[in-house]
Image (cartoon, coloured by chain):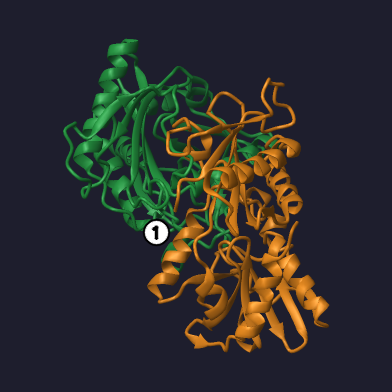
Chain colours: A green, B orange
Amino acid sequence: MSTPILFLVTRPVLSSPPAEDAGFVQARADAPQLNVMDLGVTRGDGFFETISVANGHPQALEPHLARFSHSASLMDMPEPNRTVWRQAVLAAIAAHERESGSSPELFAKIIMTRGVEGTGMATGWVYADEVEDFGAARRDGIRVVRLDRGYRHDVAQTSPWLLQGAKTLSYAVNRAAVREAARRGADDVIFVSSDGYALEGPTSNVIARFGNRIVTPQTDQGILAGTTQASVFEFFKERGFETAYERVAADLLDEADALWLVSSVRQAAPLRSLDGREFPVNAALAGQLNAFLLARVK
Amino acid sequence: MSTPILFLVTRPVLSSPPAEDAGFVQARADAPQLNVMDLGVTRGDGFFETISVANGHPQALEPHLARFSHSASLMDMPEPNRTVWRQAVLAAIAAHERESGSSPELFAKIIMTRGVEGTGMATGWVYADEVEDFGAARRDGIRVVRLDRGYRHDVAQTSPWLLQGAKTLSYAVNRAAVREAARRGADDVIFVSSDGYALEGPTSNVIARFGNRIVTPQTDQGILAGTTQASVFEFFKERGFETAYERVAADLLDEADALWLVSSVRQAAPLRSLDGREFPVNAALAGQLNAFLLARVK
């Protein structure tokens, strides 16, 4: 990865005191910028969003900012100042273009934490960088295994302190799941609830095609409502498919005609195998879907 | 909280390249020391231990270092260099005494992360600081509520990627649980498995007295083996109690003669209520137990 463009967000929340600057200021990404007592690192106590930037346009920026605010609310943190965050994202993209030239695909990541312990002041930053080459995943597909997430499908309702549905910095389990997938010879994961429902990937949503129907697991199951998933539904609706949010039994995935994991940055990755069973990848469709996703200008 | 004494650990793992320094170097805790791309913050991808320091002696240092290594192993991270970490802890304690004078109670926290994304090099640091005043919790007790942890008691065996039993930096859920406790008018939490077993607190172990028996939940249930809990068992054994690790149905806690949450730093906090039902606190016993714990010199 190249050195990213970094902006520290000096007024991350609506209640931040006014300042002379725009609410964000550029800083060196290769120099230390965080306090070791920041609760973002000592407790994974913060949240983030990762935004695709295609041909200079941040994609689904408003839905990302809305989800960022939703995470804040689920974590009892103050409301982010979306105006400042929006401008900081745009500034990071512009600075990247200015310093590294234009690039067809970037990503911008926004992070807000509960701040340095004892201060009660949130910490925030944005960085923009080039995207690694996902050509093979988008075209040839990925190998996926199903792994238990350990929670029932309904814990977001019964036990909100488990923070299912918040995009927190406490992602160690998501990363451990991907390492387990690698041990099983796979690239990625579909999490399954302890009561047998297909949920989502560690950093993606699941899309299944059954004949003329395109289905994604219902988001009331502690699943992050996907910004890319919404665009994938648009793509299929335009082509005459029916789309639906449903509870999907994990076993039912074996009967799908096609499966994808979709997310910002990697966009749509068709599954070429699920738990070792091969799935045929429709390369033409994968190409059209990813071209559609990359062409989004908002 | 005062400004802590900070040492950056430059050789955190056995495979770290040799260096001119001792493997750690003092740094300013009030200045930024961490890269924003460190996986410790972007993914909560690291682990930690908190060690009590009573009258200059780090307590249970070797069990803490052993558990630190165990966390590394559960997270597929390289083996920490315990010699370096041990010396760094001692150096931080000595520097705190030198710079702030001797203090009856400090804590030292050790943190190791997977490092800056893409570098493959772990990041590590140690800090030592004064302990807040836990006198009231130790003497008068705390109010506790039981909350669902969402996992079955056996997920550490069936689903190791859930990292139950590793002391990871991904602690957002533990903090959210304590906020939920506060909403319910309580101070702390006992987590319950989805199949009804009492587990542990967000940062403590549970001890229950039933007559002459002292019981703590069996550690094969994704529970961190407590260094303080081990000392509490010693205390009670010396006084003729029987001690046991058992599976404890969450409902059984209502029938306990006494309950404690025990941990490094806060030591032993007797419960004065559980889900609103009052428990009598034996102040004399609480005093003796905490005096015993604070007198440990290793």
The residue under label 1 is: A220
Q: Is residue B251 above or below residue B74?
A: below
Q: Do we see residue A177 in this rendering?
A: no
Q: Name the kind of residue labelled 1 in the image.
A: Asp
Q: Is residue A290 above or below residue A149?
A: above
Q: Do we see residue B230 in this rendering?
A: yes
> Residue B40, how many percent across, how many down?
53, 39
Q: Is residue A123 above or below residue A154?
A: above
> Residue B256, how many percent across, how many down?
65, 86
| Count of marks overlaid on the render | 1
Q: Secondary structure at mark 1?
A: loop
Residue farthest to the top?
A: A101
- Near-viewer residue (B130 or B100): B100
Q: Tell me which residue sits at (47%, 39%) in the image.
A: B29
- Say left or right for B255 vs B131: right
> Residue A76, how many percent across, how many down?
34, 58
Q: Tell me which residue sits at (71%, 67%) in the image.
A: B229
- Say left or right for B183 vs B104: left
- Say left or right for B48 vs B81: left
Which of the 4 image quadrants contains residue A47? Answer: top left
Q: Tell me which residue sits at (31%, 52%) in the image.
A: A70
Label 1 CA crowd tier, 10 Å (few <14, some 14–19, many 20+): some
Q: Tell me which residue sits at (19%, 39%) in the image.
A: A83
Q: Chain of mark 1?
A: A
Quadrant of the frame with the C terminus of chain A? top left
> Residue B85, how many percent across, how many down?
69, 39
- Near-viewer residue (B234 or A14): B234
- Near-viewer residue (B295 or A239): B295
